[in-house]
Image (cartoon, helix red, strand yellow):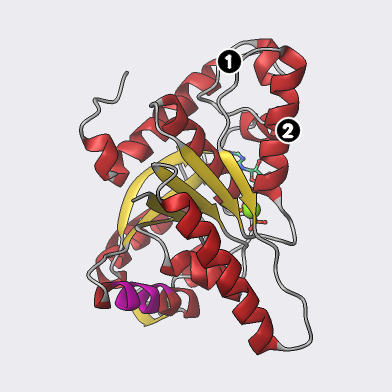
Amino acid sequence: MAHIITVGNEKGGSGKSTTALHLAVYLLYQGFSVATIDVDSRQQTLTRYVRNRRATADASKREVLMPKHVHLPTAWGDSITENQRVELDIFERTMNGLNNEVDFVVIDTPGFDGNLARLAHGAADTLITPINDSMIDIDVLARIDPKTGAPLEASPYTRNVHKARAERQKTGRNLDWVLVRNRISNLASNNASRVQDLVDSLAGGLGCRVAAGIAERVIFRSLFLSGMTVFDPLDAEMLGSAPSISHVNARHEYRALVAALNLPQLDALKLSA
Ligand SMILES: Nc1ncnc2c1ncn2[C@@H]1O[C@H](COP(=O)(O)OP(=O)(O)OP(=O)(O)O)[C@@H](O)[C@H]1O
Ligand SMILES: [Mg+2]
């Protein structure tokens, strides 16, 4: 059975698609077979990221590890019920097909609620939620008392995750929810440490854990055009830009993130330095 990793957050632009491709490519380099699924029909960032990767591979004539990529389109018929039936059908058929074919499935979801996004959360063995150092990102997880910082109530997104987990638990499966701070500023600030403290203190109550984060690095923006990740060979031809210490540091951070996920298949593998 494939291990399903869903990358989700109803907050747009938190780093879901970037994280999804990095995880997928990291797992490919560990020798696993990996499928990626894009259920963000509107932006299709992951689909374009994978397409850019294929184009770089073709142009360079070098071997580039590729995930098996699937884009699942949103159904746009007149009937909501019928759309949901069509989406459930295509989602289940895709997952059933991949289940025995690959070791990991990484699903990228849009920055808003929707039927396919909910199906992707319901299928997750591991749910990764990238969040940025902002009180707005915290608000997507829980309503906070502005004076005391105490959590007042779970947000709609958190309630959806709890629902997905409860459904999975009925069938003896779990959903491991991991928050990842992304785009962490290199400059220490009061805001960043306040957000970090809040995330750490909220995690237990929300039923999630917090993994080591990824710093803000300009390289992530340019990597998209070449379809490369920080795990690919660090040379200018592949990266589309000169390699830098930033690539190496980002590589370390993503490795630490994957280690923190405690993926069952990776337990046996010693993460190379
Ligand atoms: N660690 C990082 N450092 C700097 N920029 C980053 C980092 N991670 C992601 N980005 C940039 O942030 C922007 C949003 O990233 P991405 O598209 O992965 O987010 P998303 O959550 O998938 O967005 P959406 O909700 O719109 O699908 C992109 O320009 C991406 O290159
Ligand atoms: Mg995205």
Q: Residue at x 22, y 70 (%)?
A: 172
Q: Which residue is the site of mark 1?
A: 244
Locate residue 67: give its quadrant.
top right
Locate residue 216: give its quadrant.
top right
Q: Which residue is the site of mark 2?
A: 52
Q: Residue at x 49, y 54 (%)?
A: 97
Mark 2 or 1 closer to N-term? 2
Q: Which residues are magenta?
A: 161-168
Residue type (three-letter) at the residue carrying disc 2: Asn
Residue type (three-letter) at the residue carrying disc 1: Ser
Task: Determine crowd level at label 2: few under 14, some 14-19, many 20+ residues with C-alpha closer than 10 A.
Answer: some
Q: Does the magenta run of residues contain 29?
A: no
Instruction: Return the x and y of residue 226 as percentages of the image width and height.
Output: 71, 27
Q: Residue at x 44, y 77 (%)?
A: 160
Q: Residue at x 47, y 39 (%)?
A: 34
Instruction: Return the x and y of residue 253 as percentages of the image width and height.
Output: 41, 32
**Front-most of residues 118 and 207:** 118
Instruction: Return the x and y of residue 64 as percentages of the image width and height.
Output: 60, 21
* Distance Cα–Cα, label 2 vs label 1: 21 Å
Magenta span main SS: helix
Task: Determine crowd level at label 1: few under 14, some 14-19, many 20+ residues with C-alpha closer than 10 A.
Answer: few
Residue 260, compared with residue 170, is above or below; it is above
